[in-house]
Image (cartoon, rainbow, N blue to C red):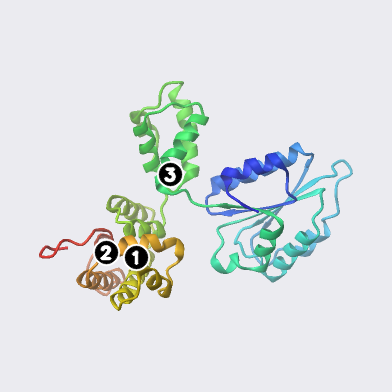
Amino acid sequence: MNLNPTNLGAQLARSLAPAYFVYGDEPLLVDESLDQIRAAARRQGFDERESHVVSDTRFNWVRLQSGLNNLSLFSMRKIVEVRLVTGKPGVEGSAAIIEVLDNLSPDMLWIFSAPKLDRSTASSKWVKALQGKAVCVEVRPLPPERLPVWIGQRMQAAGLTCDAEAIQILADRVEGNLLAAQQEISKLVLLSQGRRVSADLVRQSTADGARFDVFQLADAALARDVPRAVRILNGLRQEGIAPVLTLWALVREINALVAVWIRMDQGTPLSRAMNDAGVWRVRQDLVARALRGRSEPGIRRLLAGAARADLVVKGARPGLPWNTLLELVLLIARPEAPAGRAA
């Protein structure tokens, strides 16, 4: 069974499964999902808890398996948690997880957790076994457009009333960092003292805790959201992200755009061109939006901009790396100017 954090509570209210697998890169939502499972288990008499952290291939899977039947005389039901720090348990760990799932007991609840799974891990035998015999909870990053609603709901649950502007300011300051968002909401509970939360109060009390990555930058540029793309680029610079890593993410998307555009220019339909170019289905709408209205001169400008940025970022040509990256972001993000005008 595959769920998301929103409908996990309903599943737990119906019944407690013998095994759960929670994975994703949003720590707050992962931890809250794990807390929900633990609370439901305690209500059903799982009073003992055993926790294991698998951080590398040296983890002793034999010891884990040998201790499965060592239940306390005073607590006949046990929670066993296995945190896979890297999301890659290795050959021995994979076999151990499959064996555990083949021998599930009503007196033992297994909770596995891991970061976001890459494509190869998602198709591995141990993940397939979990998907077949455990309740799997995938925690996905919250899209920026949904963040204000999420914050509003959290504020309401905390007993706060607030202005729409206040919610939007907080969303801008904590984008990509839900843990920071929750911490700021907790702070506002203390500062508001029962008063309505205003935009001014949010400005005065919250730090800019937004956390971005290079993939969010690429997505914002493809979506032609210039203000957000520029804000993310500035955030990456302030966070100390290497310019070369930022360049890699942008060039990767430019290469994809060029590959699809060439196929379309040769007469291949858009959907087939994207499939042939290896564009993932979940990203095809974004790529299609970025290609809308692109001409051959515009494609050539993208390639020239990428080549220029590569030289500047790697020190082979004079220039300021972050300024050059900004120029490249704008080449991707802004629609081409009409014929006869500069793009």
Residue 172 relative to residue 111: left or right: left
Is there a contact, CB below 8 Å, between mark 1 and mark 2?
A: yes
Identity of the residue drawn at 23% across and 59% down: 335
Q: Which residue is mark 2?
A: 328
Work out whether 245 lies above or below 213.
below
The answer to whether residue 173 is visible is: yes
Q: Position of residue 302 (x, y in %)?
A: 26, 69
Q: Position of residue 171 (x, y in %)?
A: 39, 41
- Mark whose residue sits in front, 3 or 2: 3
Q: Which residue is mark 1?
A: 250
Residue type beneath disc 1: Leu
Q: Which of marks 2 and 1 precedes in the sequence? A: 1
Residue type beneath disc 3: Arg
Please identify the quadrant where the N terminus is shown: bottom right
Work out whether 335 lies above or below 170.
below
Q: CA distance from mark 1 to mark 2?
A: 8 Å
Identity of the residue drawn at 10% across and 65% down: 340
Q: Which residue is mark 3?
A: 146
Q: Quadrant of residue 85?
A: bottom right
Q: Residues within 10 Å of mark 1 (few under 14, many from 20)?
A: many
Q: Which of marks 2 and 3 precedes in the sequence? A: 3
Identity of the residue drawn at 50% across and 26% down: 159
Query: In what element is the residue under mark 1?
Result: helix
Residue 311 relative to residue 272: left or right: left
Residue type beneath disc 2: Leu
